[in-house]
């Protein structure tokens, strides 16, 4: 990257662009995106659109306003399509922009509640094992602070059960 491009990334109309971290919950609908400065939530997005369309738009909007330092995404469990698509988009974006990439379990973002697997079953965390059970899914929430998340650098999607 040329020095002018680096400078353009850091400066916007004479002011320094804030560095932020992004959290993406792409394993359910609506999918959620949080923007965090110093680990505190400063902006959020929610979309019922397909993640393949809306996530790219949201990333573009965020990257026009902020310098993204890292991206964290939910890599398990939940919607297979949401998991695959969010991983491919976010991993590609991070490699292209040289951004740190991390993953977190979906159970950390819904207070350990059930996560929809399909119309009849949900993923349930019991005794550190993920099981399929009939249970009402718990909605996801963006945390107000990122400091307590158990993020990992092992970002590959974890499907729990085989995709069919």
Image: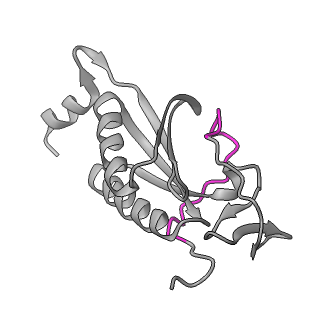
Please state the horizontal and vertical placement of residue 94, each as a whole percent of the image.
Answer: 35, 53
Q: State the colouring used for the structure image.
A: one colour
As drawn, which residue projects farthest toward the right? 127
Residue 143 lies in the magenta-colored region = yes
Residue 147 lies in the magenta-colored region = yes
Q: Nearer the viewer, residue 100 or 157?
A: 157
As drawn, which residue projects farthest toward the front? 119
Q: Nearer the viewer, residue 26 or 71?
A: 26
Please state the horizontal and vertical placement of residue 105, each as a whole percent of the image.
Answer: 64, 59
Q: With respect to residue 23, does 18 lie above or below?
A: above
Please state the horizontal and vertical placement of residue 73, each as a whole percent of the image.
Answer: 52, 54
Which residue: 51% across, 65% down?
155
Which residue: 43% across, 63% down?
87
Q: With respect to residue 110, does 123 lie above or below?
A: below
Which secondary structure dominates the residues rendered in magenta?
Answer: loop
Left or right, 23 with reference to 10: right
Q: With respect to residue 33, does 117 lie above or below?
A: below
Left or right, 131 with reference to 5: right
Q: Quadrant of residue 95?
A: bottom left
The magenta stretch is 142-157
Q: Quadrant of residue 41?
A: top right
Which residue: 70% across, 43% down?
148
Please state the horizontal and vertical placement of residue 74, each as a whole percent of the image.
Answer: 56, 57
């Amino acid at each position: 990257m040329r020095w002018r491009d680096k400078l353009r990334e850091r400066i916007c109309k004479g002011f320094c662009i804030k560095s932020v971290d992004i959290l993406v919950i792409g394993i359910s609908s609506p999918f959620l995106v949080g923007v965090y400065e110093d680990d505190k939530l400063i902006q959020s997005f929610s979309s019922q659109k397909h993640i393949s369309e809306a996530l790219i738009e949201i990333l573009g909007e965020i990257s026009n306003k902020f310098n993204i330092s890292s991206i964290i995404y939910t890599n398990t469990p939940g919607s297979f399509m949401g998991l695959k698509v969010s991983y491919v988009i976010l991993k590609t974006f991070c490699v292209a922009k040289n951004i740190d990439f991390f993953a977190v379990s979906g159970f950390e973002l819904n207070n350990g509640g059930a996560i929809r697997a399909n119309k009849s079953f949900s993923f349930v965390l019991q005794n550190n094992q993920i099981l399929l059970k009939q249970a009402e899914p718990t909605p996801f929430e963006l945390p107000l602070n990122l400091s307590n998340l158990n993020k990992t650098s092992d970002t590959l999607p974890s499907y729990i059960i085989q995709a069919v």
